[in-house]
Every structure is written in C-alpha cells, then in structure tokens.
Image (cartoon, helix red, strand yellow):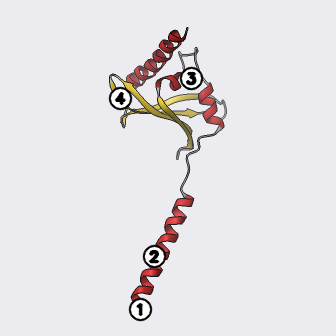
Amino acid sequence: MSLGNHLRVFLCVVFMGVLVGYVFNAKKDITDHDYIDIVKEGYLENFSDVTVRNAFNYAFFEPYWRYYQAKTGEQVVELSGDITFQGVKGHAILQFVVNEQTQQFSLQAMKFKDVVLNQQQQQKLVGMVYQIWEKKQLAYE
C-alpha cells in the first residue's frame, strides 16, 4: 500500500470517528419532564374549563411536547403541531415558561409557519383552539 492510500485510510477512520462521536453526543429532546406535566395538566388564563393538554390535543395534529432550559436560565416547555389557523394550514410552536418556585407557567411566545405572532394573533389562535375543543365536546354529548 502506498503512502497516499495510507493517508486516505487514516483520514477515513478519523472522519468516521468524528461522525460517530457527534451522533452519540447529540442532544436528544427531553419529552418526559415534570415541567411538561405542569403545563399539560394546567390551565391557561381565561380557560379554566379544560387542561392545556386536552384543548391542544383536539386542535393540533400530532402535538409534540418537549422541555429545555433556555440560555437565559428559563425553564421552557414547547408545544408544536400542525393546525389550520385563519384558513391556512401550517405548523405552530408555543413556548411556555415555567416558574421554578411557584410551579406556575405562562405562554411567552408563539409562531405559526415560522412567523412570530403578536399578542393579538396569539389570543386568536388560543381562542380558536378552545373553540375547537368546545365544538368537539358538544358533538360527543
């Protein structure tokens, strides 16, 4: 084997080692955490009839929950899923911040189709989610 072939084999082995190291050290989503349960079982302001989990499970297609600690130190629970909002189908992401001391949470940010929603748009989307829940409850009665 020539020196060029040895060099290629060496570089290939190094590359594979780096790739394997990256794959095994990649951060996994945390989908089972106490803070996720706090948000799921909690209630949003003005919507005390149904838990956050139940309302969004009815409105979102394949809701996905995850937890992470933000660079600012805040405890964030993120809910994402597909929904039709104002006649447009798209992917929505909601971020709840959990207060460690009080175990309370608040809705801090929301995106729809990669666009950050303002306060009024957030209220419309949340209101629509709870209207969907109410309609489905009436259908089952």
Mark 1 or 2, nearer chain start? 1
SS for callout 4: strand
Q: Residue at x 52, y 47 (%)?
A: 71
Q: Residue at x 38, y 28 (%)?
A: 118
Mark 3 or 2, nearer chain start? 2
Instruction: Give how far apart the Cα atoms at labels 1 and 2 are.
Output: 16 Å
SS for callout 2: helix
Q: Can you tell which mark lies on residue 54?
A: 3
Residue behind mark 4: 89
Q: Is residue 20 above or below residue 49?
A: below
Compared across the picture, whether 78 is left or right of 42 comes to left
Task: Tell me which amino acid carries mark 3.
Answer: Asn
Mark 1 or 3, nearer chain start? 1
Task: Tell me which amino acid carries mark 1.
Answer: Ser
Asked if labels 2 and 3 touch by Cβ distance under 8 angstroms, the answer is no
Mark 1 surroundings: few (<14), some (14-19) or many (≥20) residues within 10 A: few
Q: Is residue 25 above or below residue 136?
A: below
Instruction: Give how far apart the Cα atoms at labels 2 and 4 are.
Output: 45 Å
Instruction: Give how far apart the Cα atoms at labels 4 and 3 are.
Output: 21 Å
Task: Tell me which amino acid carries mark 4.
Answer: Lys
Q: Can you tell which mark lies on residue 12?
A: 2
Q: What is the quadrant of the N terminus in the image?
A: bottom left
